Amino acid sequence: MKLSNAHGRPPPHRPEDERLGIGASFAYGFQHVLTMYGGIIAVPLIIGQAAGLSGADTGILIAAALFMCGLATLLQSLGVPFLGAKLPLVQGVTFASVATMLAIVTKGGGLPSVFGAILVSAAFGFVIAPYFSKVVRFFPPVVTGSVIATIGLSLLPTAGNWAMGGDADATGYGSMGNIGLAGLTLAIVLALSKVKSAAISRLSILLAMVLGTLIAVAFGMTDFSDVGEGAIFAFPTPFHFGAPTFHVSAIISMVIVVIVTLTETTADLLAIGEIVGTKVDSRRIANGLRADMLSSTISPIFGSFTQTAFAQNVGLVAVTKIKSRFVVAAGGLIMIAIGLFPVLGRVVADVPMPVLGGAGLVLFGTVAASGIRTLSTVKYDNTMNLIIVASSIGFGMIPIANPDFYDKFPDWFATIFDSGISSAAIMAIVLNLLFNHLRAGNTDDQSVFVAAGSARTVCPADVANLVDGDHVKDGKLIDADGEEVPVVDDV
């Protein structure tokens, strides 16, 4: 006898295969889009500003990101043979690549060099995906946590720059008005996050940006005059920003980003599998990683960047309990539709920089906090993990605290290490291999950097009194025969 669900259909074999109907799927799918929208547009806004793009071109960059994120989400959630994990994973532009792309844009050849580096590094990622799914043990939380924390920390100066106005040469940069608008936007984010409505709380970033922009309009601090310039509807044009160029140093730095991205996506695949209650084995991980990298290889053709699974949407699945991958696929279709209307991208591009700065403090800080949360699961007692974390984050902060630190170094070296994320990733991976995998030369004597183990000690005389079979139960010492061993005062 076959059981049926409320819709009269047999229950799916896997929770993620449940179908909710078109209306419900698009409603919940739109919620996924709103949850990730701020994260998607942040990357093209950052890169567009660094590349000196006009409002119209930045709008195209945003539209391309949305279009490609939609396609990548469809591939990941629906899947085809050897591609796609067929899980409710939303794909978006990875934050891990921002610092590296900024270094390439400013010192390594502009946007064409960025796109060339993404194309080659993603193709490399596609090739190693099935092998990476088996060697992910070399990237434990001590590595991924250090890298993710550095990602957030390295982006916070960008949020500060936005809060001041975004352009150091512009009139009013760093003014009380700009910083006040950023502070007000931040206050709105915090206030909305405290609202009892879960829907409003989850949309606090987006709603704060809308309200902050309306306040800026009221005070004459923004201009939407260029929104009408350009096409309302347009299919993303291949190589709109020029044919990709290929520089070895830029490619090497983006390969590092791809390795980090593969690690993040693997973690998200395992997390969503646990939340949904479905099996995620190495084959499924490999399929998910291949979809990630194929989407990333195609992205630069249309003017977009490296793709990855969005962790905030993994959290949304956990909160809503809506596990269907077809809901996420509906969200992918919505993103494609939005990406086909550049006018929407131009509207977003004209959101005042201070508004983005106020929201960015929370957005980027959340990334850093995620890394810290990962690091909280790391074992520090009697290990060298503390120095791995300290050295990795410290090394990653050097180009952030001192942007001219590598100016005297060769260009190829500076391009790699000018990125805080690349610096932290290299240090974390190398030190993890050195201390946790290559045991030769390790000593039993504790280093000054080793976190001490438990402060509890047992005297040799007490240990000598124990016999085989003694154990503790309910706070009492029990011998092998099940009798309690009495505890007496010292005599």
Image (cartoon, rainbow, N blue to C red):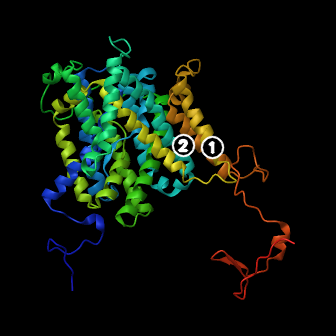
Amino acid at the residue labelled 1:
Ile
Q: Residue 396 location, x and y as percent? A: 55, 33
Q: Residue 282 location, x and y as percent? A: 45, 61
Residue at 33%, 27% (x, y): give it: 182
Q: What is the total number of numbered labels drawn onto the structure image?
A: 2
For this rendering, which residue is in front, 320 or 253?
320
Please identify the quarter of the rendering in which residue 300 is found: top left
* Residue 347 in view (yes/no): yes
Q: Left or right of 267: which side holds 379? A: right
Q: Residue 190 location, x and y as percent? A: 34, 39
For this rendering, which residue is in front, 118 or 342?
342
Q: Is residue 323 above or below residue 194?
A: below
Q: Mark 1 Cα within 10 Å, few/some/many (few <14, many 20+)?
A: many
**Disc 1: which residue:** 388
Instruction: Point out the image quarter for the N terminus.
Output: bottom left
Instruction: Point out the image quarter for the C terminus.
Output: bottom right
* Residue 139 in view (yes/no): no
Q: Is residue 77 above or below residue 416?
A: below
Q: Is residue 450 above or below residue 219?
A: below
**Disc 2: which residue:** 146
For this rendering, which residue is in front, 384 or 118?
384
- Residue at far bottom of view: 481
Residue at 65%, 51% (x, y): give it: 436
For this rendering, which residue is in front, 488 or 193?
488
Q: CA distance from mark 1 to mark 2?
A: 8 Å
Question: Element at badge 1?
Answer: helix
Amino acid at the residue labelled 2:
Ser
Q: Pick whichever of labels 1 and 2 is earlier in the sequence.
A: 2
Q: Left or right of 137: which side holds 319? A: left
Please identify the quarter of the rendering in which residue 349 is found: top left
Please identify the quarter of the rendering in which residue 304 is found: top left
